[in-house]
Image (cartoon, grey):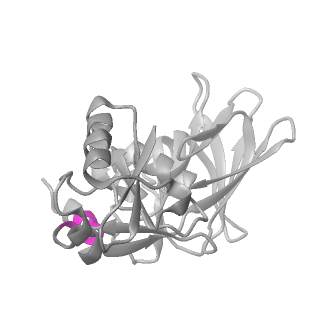
Amino acid sequence: MTAAAKLPSAPRVAFVASDAEAAQQALDDLYRRYGTVEPEDADIIVPLGGDGFMLETLHRFVGSGKPIFGMHRGSVGFLMNPYRLEGLAERLAAAQPVELHPLDMMATCERGDVCRAIAFNEVSLLRESRQAAKLRISVDGVVRLDELMADGILLATPVGSTAYNLSAHGPIIPLGAGILALTPISAFRPRRWRGALLPHNARVLIEALESDKRPVSAVADFTEVREVVRVEICEDRDIAMRLLFDREANLEERVFKEQFLT
């Protein structure tokens, strides 16, 4: 469901909400407080929900050039600002921008089909069966790992480094570091390999070995491709999305603080 708002002496703001009850209630409250414009006519998009809905919003408005100011009305809200009904115009005027560039995934399937998708968090390859995936890893045309046996592997952006990557024991990357995290998921061989940090302009090729008996799927945020044989990944600098954050809770500081949580 979509509604929107026009704030006095402020940019035109469109609200979009997840299906969660709290998000729908916030949507109704904001609609009654501020009025409405359609998202295509808005200057700023305000999604109401959790991080999953924020990712959906980024994908929905990619290429629009519209900045995104999320407010937390879901479960996980790492990419969101706190929800408050009052003072929205002042918050937007003082908000700090963060520019995000997604990963571009090109996945080739067993049957020869090619699927392309982008990911603001990570691209992950995962085993589809009881057997571990067997993968070959190349970076910038050089084979760096002849054979990785694992549940899978992922390549994460700095924003995504605090999500699935962190759960897989990958490193947290400060925003602006110009680095991507290549992290194995439950590695069986080689046991001691814990992943690698790559420059943001690296081109990564992951090939599925013995894919007939060890099928592998590839996931870019929430786009899944089954039975892949090779996946090429690189950062897409032609796409830039701007997230807006309250000054006292900007995203750079949140990512940095995650490194010191105990």
* Above or below, 121 relative to 66: above
Query: What secondary structure is the magenta-colored segment mainly?
Result: helix
The structure residue drawn at horizontal position 54% and vertical position 71%, both measured from the top left corner, is: 240
Residue 253 counted in the magenta span? yes
In the rendered image, residue 42, in percent from the top left (x then y), is placed at 48, 63
In the displayed structure image, the side of residue 142 where residue 65 appears, left or right: left
**Segment colored magenta:** 249-255
Residue 76 counted in the magenta span? no
* Above or below, 209 relative to 144: above
In the displayed structure image, the side of residue 103 where residue 110 appears, left or right: right
Snapshot quadrant of residue 261: bottom left
Extreme residue toward the left, this view: 262
In the rendered image, residue 247, in percent from the top left (x then y), is placed at 20, 73
Closer-to-camera residue (9/227): 9
Snapshot quadrant of residue 102: bottom right
The structure residue drawn at horizontal position 38% and vertical position 71%, both measured from the top left corner, is: 11
In the rendered image, residue 83, in percent from the top left (x then y), is placed at 21, 51
The structure residue drawn at horizontal position 20% and vertical position 54%, both measured from the top left corner, is: 82
Closer-to-camera residue (94/55): 94
In the displayed structure image, the side of residue 155 where residue 109 appears, left or right: right
